[in-house]
Structure formats: C-alpha cells, structure tokens
Amino acid sequence: MLRSLYSGISGLRSHQTMLDVTGNNIANVNTTAFKASAAQFQDTLSQLTQAAGGASTTIGGTNPAQVGLGVQVAGISTNFAQGSSQATGKTTDLMISGDGFFVTSLGGETLYTRAGSFDFDSLGRLVSPDGAIVQGWGAVGGVVADGGAVGNIRLPAEAIVPASASNAATFTGNLPSDSKSGSALVRTVDVYDDLGNSRTISVTFTRTDAPDGWTVADTNVPANSIALVADGTTGNFIASGALTVDGIAMNLAALEGFSGLNTVAGKTDNGNEAGTLNSYTLGADGTLVGLFSNGQQQAIGRIALATFVNPGGLEKAGSSAYRATFNSGGAALGTPGAAGLGSLTSGALEMSNVDLSQEFTNLIVAQRGFQANARIITTSDEVLQELTNLKR
C-alpha cells in the first residue's frame, strides 16, 4: 500500500520538474539565442517479488515479478537547434549561422555564449550586456595570427595606420594615335615618402614620327625616357625598357593607342600618409576591420568561435552563457566560417528556439500527469482508511 503512495509522490515531483522546465522555456521565448530544455523521465528501481525460473524438461520457465517504485527525472537536455534571425541593423550585433559559441571572459572565467548582443565599452573592448569581454585574436600590422592564445577584442580609438612610401605608379587610358608629331601630354601623380609627406612627380608623353609611337620621359629630366611602339594587333604599346621617375617605377602596360581619345591618367600603386581610425566593419569571418582617414582599411582583430564534442554537456552559467564541464569536452577554437564552425552575420541576432505550440502542449501533459499522480495518493489514502476502519 505504501509503495503506491511513494510512487505517486515521485510522480508529483517529476511532473513538477517538467512544469518548471516548460515554464522556464516559455519565460525565455524572447531571450536572445535561448536554447529550450526538455525533462526526460525514467523509472526507478523495481522491487523483486518473484525471481525468474529456468525451464526444464518437465517444468516451464517463469518470468520475474517486479513492482515498480515510481519515476524519476533522468536528465534535462538542451536543444541547440538554430534559432531564427532577427535583424537589428546594429553593427556589433552578431549572429552565428551554424555551429559554435562566442568565447567570453568574465571575472577571469572563460564562458561561452550564442547571444551576440555586443557593444564597445569605455576601453574599446567588445563586451556583452553583463560585461563579459569577447575573446579573439589581435592583429599586428593588419595581419591576424589565428590559432594562438586568445585575448580581448578591442577597437583602439587611438589606432593609427603608419605612413608608407610609394615605389610604383600605373598609367592607364588612351594615347590618341591621331595626335600630331611633337605634341606632348603632361601627367602628374601624387606619391608619398616613408613619413607620409606627399610630393608630385611629372611624366611627359610626346608623339613621335614613328607609326603610333610615343616617348615617355621624366618631365624634370627629359633624358630619362623610353619609347612606346604600338602593337598593331592589340592596341597596346611595347615599351623599349623600364622607366623610373624619382624612385617610382612606372607601369605602362595598360596604355592603349586608339585614335580620338585622350584619357591617359596615372595613380600611385601604393604608399599613403598616416591615418586615424574613422569607423569599422565586422566581416562574416569575424574580422574587425578599421576604416582610416587616409582611405586605408586594416584588420584590427578577429573574433574566435568555440565548438565542443558534446554541447549538451555544457553547464548553464546564467546571462545566456555556458561553462565547459568534464562531459562537454574541451573547447576547440577556430575562425568563423572554418570547417565545423558557422559564419557570422553582422546586424542581426539569433532568436530563441522555443516552440510555443510544443511548450503549451507540454504544459497540458505535465498538468494531467501531475493530476493523475495526485489521484494515486488520494486513492491509496482511501484504501488505508478502509484498512484502519476494519477495527472499530
């Protein structure tokens, strides 16, 4: 008689846990990147009232007789299925499309999260709403060294792109073949020295008597020149040699020699003045790219993602974060978009994967299960009362 009472109690406890899990899922239906959980039941040990009997030539075998002692919660599993995308338009809002977790550091503890609602703090560090600092790899000279130890992702407002010297320039466009012999075209190109100082070099194109021929010379040193002879099949020119003007190598391979068009122009291939940080972008591979006042773009860092052999083994740490456990395995870090890792979408957040229709159905199932187990207790109590009434 008492066994049924305790079976009913175990059923009440288990279904109460199911209600707790379901209620928590519904409460977090609008929580960024929340992953729904589900309670899993299993029966408890059964009391053996009759052991199994083996079969013989004259007597058949008998099965064991056991009385169950109730139910218990076997575990609470987390569903890591991808949530829907919610566009926000905010650059620092990031969504992982695929597997992986952001790596964060909070109070010296490494945590993992799918919630990508980030922003920059007063020190330029990329942080979550609860102050956890996003981890990744920094860049040196615009080059990110992946695979090493991770550190804080930081956008330094004082960042400067150093000046670099120009050493090459390219001329493109058309030299008009119908120009008169001796006519000249002067073109200038702005270049930079290693301190970022700008200077102008001048090149003169002079029409020659040769068929569709030109000479190209340093305007300041006319003797420093080469000849251009038209290639009759492609419309381009064949240079008689290499031309260097004031230390800048001239690339003339793209020039053309059709008639009627005078579009020749030059530009430096490299070199720039120093620049300060104006703005930034975040790429699908997690790269934080700074846009500088001199028009240059340079990588500042790259966000790291982590994967686990068993994500279900992660322990919820609050604030939509998880911590690694013995059963989750160690974190394997990698670049967004690499094998086994999802890519990042800037300006969007992952929504909760809670299915309300399923959760409300679970509420009904848990409620009816709770009611049925409560009925076991009241029925057992009535039977016990009848037993005590046998002696009055």
Image (cartoon, helix red, strand yellow):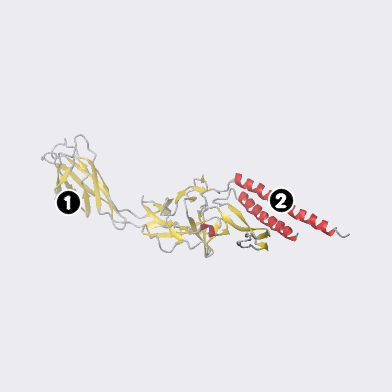
Task: Label 2: state its secondary structure.
Answer: helix
Relative depth, front residue between 140 and 66 = 66
Q: Is residue 283 above or below residue 152?
A: above
Q: Is residue 30 above or below residue 155?
A: above
- The answer to whether residue 48 is visible is no
The x and y percentages for residue 380 are 77, 56
The x and y percentages for residue 354 are 58, 48
Mark seen at residue 149 = none
Residue drawn at (57%, 50%) of the image:
31
Q: Which residue is mark 1?
A: 242
Question: Gap between marks 1 and 2, in whole Å?
Answer: 94 Å
- The answer to whether residue 372 is visible is yes
**Is 9 on the left-hand or right-hand side of 290?**
right
Residue drawn at (24%, 47%) of the image:
170
Relative depth, front residue between 311 and 26 = 311
Mark seen at residue 372 = 2
* Residue that sits furthest to the top in the current view: 260
